Image (tube, helix red, strand yellow):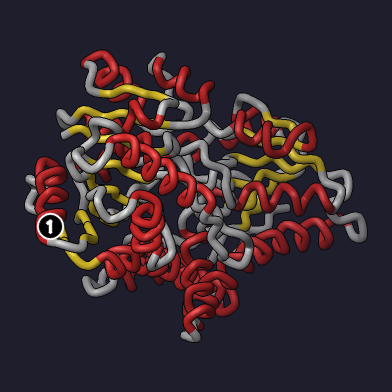
Amino acid sequence: MKLSMIGTGYVGLVTGVCLANCGNDVVCLDVDKAKIEKLKGGKSPIYEPGLDDLLERNISSGRLRFSTDAFESHKDADMIFICVGTPSDERGHTDMKYIHSAADQIAEVLIKLGPAAKAKVVVVKSTVPVGTSIMVRNRIREKVGAEIKFEIANNPEFLKEGAAIDDFNKPDRVVCGVENEATGQRMRDLYDPFVRNGHPIYIMEILSSEMVKYASNAMLACKISFINEMANLCEAYGANVTRVREGMCADKRIGNQFLYPGLGYGGSCFPKDTLACIMMGEKAGVPTPVNKAVHELNQGQRDRFFNKIMSHFKAKDAPGGLSGKTLAFWGIAFKPKTDDIREAPAITLMRKALGYGAKCKAFDPVANENARRDLGPAVDIVDDMYSAAEGADALIVATDWDEFKSPDFDRLAKLMKGKVIFDGRNLYRPQQLADNKFSHYSVGRAPVVSG
């Protein structure tokens, strides 16, 4: 098929590259000329394992092209995918300006092509409030009139940052919202090569398709907040959340995915989509107490962990607290295998520490540049994990990158000014830290206080 993608962000680029790699002819469109030139040269503007190789391979084959020209991008396309950003404010209101702009752009191209052109399928792939795809259809229809034919569809993405290529190529399921059987068949034809593993393609009505995305992410966010709530209870009663999790997750009805205690979820999806569910509920007059609790607990988890840091230094150095202390952070991205720092717990903790007069040093394997742009000179971003720890009064583990899991504790002891680790991802066994004479604070487990 001939396809075009509006937007070369995370979703648009991964979708375009993977569909091209399956033999389709794909054009990715963006208004950012610098980004398009970078992509033409085979350089991805985002970090995603495996993406650069696929990008170069499909550009070389001629199946993947990049453009800033809307008409040239869309004129031959059988399907036009809308993959633009849908940012939201702190209450969950979605900014629809990029969706509106994409719809207007498509309408202009359809008008130029005229009534004789083959009907295209406009596919909304961005995560959007329920009802948006119908709004896009109506907005385009108002501009092009009744004579020009096109179809609308919704096709939510389920890509995990750090595993997006595998998620796209081997999906658990593909969800497509359509208005008629013919459009559903065209979507099946597009995605059939990706479900040879027997996993399903669900063709459903558009409103349900849009809701599937929110329901899925809200459920995953709920699991994360739930295990953190249990971890907090474990701390209060002296239980060990690691053992509790083992016993709980052995139940096949529960499973073990997304049930890891820590600093809570971040990134662009779970916070935004949970808030969107709350906002949709408010607009419809439908209470959403579970989603509200999930969001509040997640935000509070960071405060709770920061209070452990504050309490340690107040108890040790009262009344000075964090003022003048140097805190080292291992990990800045909200999760490993990505350079995404949106809603990252490390950023929240660093800003809190700076507000109390602390100095912060940080290292992340891939997110350093994004952190430098976001934090500026307030935080010393270094290019080595041990350089970050040098002279530090405490080490905070904020992202569970593999390289942080088995550090040289002897080396750390010599480099650090204070021997205390705040383990926000439960990477280390408490006894392991006690044996190395470190104080250790984690999530849902009793602290180890040395010396």
Q: Residue placed at 80% from the left, 47% from the top?
A: 354
Total number of numbered discs in the rendering: 1
Please tell me which residue lies in front, 206 or 447.
206
Q: Residue placed at 16% from the left, 50% from the top?
A: 187
Image coords of residue 28 (percent x, y): 36, 30
Please tell me which residue lies in front, 403 or 218.
218
Q: Is residue 181 visible?
A: yes
Q: Is 324 left, or right, of 29 in this rendering?
A: right
Q: Is 298 left, or right, of 251 in this rendering?
A: right
Q: Residue placed at 39% from the left, 40% from the top?
A: 108
Image coords of residue 208 (percent x, y): 28, 69
Image coords of residue 301 (percent x, y): 60, 65
Q: Is 417 left, or right, of 41 in this rendering?
A: right
Quarter assignment of residue 131: bottom left
Establish if 300 lies above or below 140: below
- For label 1, the crowd category at 10 Å Cα-Cα, with few meaning under 14, some 14 to 19 and many 20 or more, is some
Q: Residue placed at 61% from the left, 67% from the top?
A: 91
Establish if 97 lies above or below 277: above
Q: Amino acid at mark 1?
A: Pro
Please tell me which residue lies in front, 202 or 180.
180
Please tell me which residue lies in front, 107 or 59.
107
Q: Which residue is mark 1?
A: 200
Image coords of residue 377 (percent x, y): 78, 32
Farthest residue, direction right: 319
Q: Where the N terminus falls, by quadrant?
A: top left
Q: Secondary structure at mark 1?
A: loop
Q: Is residue 431 visible?
A: no
